[in-house]
């Protein structure tokens, strides 16, 4: 473990009260601790940048698995139903991480600012388009996360100075080893834009029955091209993504106190028995047990 990562962990520890996630004074910034291994569980990742300080976590998306550990960063650019597990954590050496929610509009603006100076990035043929990126964090990125954690201890510092540090984190990520590939994805010329439109449509219309051809039309692609592009970028086929998103939203509604019948209707199921069956298959327990499992 490098000195900078140890320093990062020290600051994370100062901001935690125990296991779980703690939101800090800077909007979208939080820290996380797990003092023991956790079995695979379903989760929903909004766009984020995560820096791992200690321990290891594995994120499963479709047939792909991403394991990130001390010194790694993990970036997710689009809303993504995933399964996660804590694979390395002990009571005296817990998993420690910090995350920053991504503002995609602001990130895209940073791309434009960079390209006005440097010129538009050219797609790297060796990089496959994906909404998920993982790599080793350099010292500059670790330093910036440490700075965010320092600022978050003082509400005024957080409010006045936090935004400039976030901009610099975006800049460092976009000019890093993975920068060209990321900028291609985020620019208007990249393949992620039509898929991003589709993902937005899915989440705005979870109460509807959505067909592949409808999504292909939104992406302005043939049905086959759309299916292949979606699976490459999101790591799961479109219909699997839609079902996972509906069930994740239903779980949120149930935790908030909505009845199972109403939740099933809100996410577009006409048959409650089908909803109950698919919910149990997905989460491992029926809708009626959601409150006690949460």
Image (cartoon, rainbow, N blue to C red):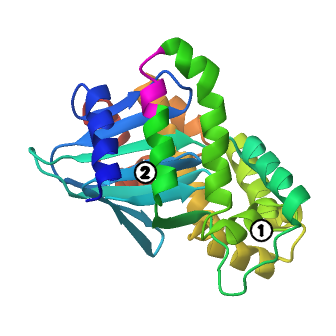
Magenta extent? 149-154
Image-based side of 106 in relation to 92, left or right: right
Magenta stretch holds residue 1: no
Image-based side of 270 in relation to 105, left or right: left
Image-based side of 255 in relation to 201, left or right: left
Please state the horizontal and vertical placement of residue 214, each as a whole percent of the image. 82, 61
Please state the horizontal and vertical placement of residue 13, each as a whole percent of the image. 26, 34
Q: Nearer the viewer, residue 14 or 236?
A: 14
Magenta stretch holds residue 153: yes
Name the quadrant containing residue 221.
bottom right
- Mark 1 vs 2, N-terminal side: 2
* In the depicted structure, whether residue 223 falls above or below residue 216: below
Residue 206 seen in the current view? no
Residue placed under numbered mark 1 in the picture: 184
Which residue does the image show at 49% across and 30% down from the upper left? 253
Residue placed under numbered mark 2 in the picture: 51
Which residue does the image show at 82% across and 71% down from the upper left? 121
Name the quadrant containing residue 164.
top right
Q: Quadrant of the N terminus?
A: bottom left
């Amino acid at each position: 473990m490098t000195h900078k990562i140890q320093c990062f962990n020290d600051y994370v520890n100062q901001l935690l009260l125990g296991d779980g996630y703690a939101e800090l004074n800077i909007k979208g910034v939080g820290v996380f601790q797990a003092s023991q291994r956790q079995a695979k569980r379903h989760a929903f990742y909004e766009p984020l940048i995560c820096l791992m300080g200690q321990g290891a976590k594995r994120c499963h998306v479709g047939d792909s698995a991403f394991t990130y550990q001390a010194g790694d960063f993990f970036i997710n650019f689009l809303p993504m139903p995933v399964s996660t597990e804590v694979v390395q954590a002990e009571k005296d050496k817990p998993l420690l991480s910090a995350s920053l929610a991504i503002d995609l509009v602001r990130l895209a603006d940073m791309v434009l600012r960079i390209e006005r100076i440097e010129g538009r990035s050219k797609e790297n043929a060796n990089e496959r388009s994906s909404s998920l990126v993982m790599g080793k964090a350099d010292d500059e990125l670790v330093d910036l996360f440490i700075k965010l954690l320092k600022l978050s201890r003082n509400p005024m510092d957080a409010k006045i100075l936090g935004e400039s540090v976030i901009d610099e984190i975006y800049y460092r990520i976009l000019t890093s080893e993975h920068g060209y590939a990321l900028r291609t994805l985020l620019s208007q010329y990249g393949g992620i834009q039509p898929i991003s439109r589709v993902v937005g449509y899915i989440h705005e219309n979870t109460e509807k029955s959505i067909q592949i051809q409808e999504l292909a039309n939104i992406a302005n692609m043939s049905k086959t091209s759309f299916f292949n592009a979606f699976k490459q970028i999101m790591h799961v086929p479109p219909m699997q993504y839609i079902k996972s998103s509906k069930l994740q939203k239903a779980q949120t509604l149930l935790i908030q106190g909505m009845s199972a019948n109403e939740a099933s209707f809100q996410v577009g199921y006409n048959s409650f028995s089908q909803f109950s069956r698919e919910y149990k298959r997905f989460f491992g327990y029926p809708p009626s047990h959601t409150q006690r499992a949460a």
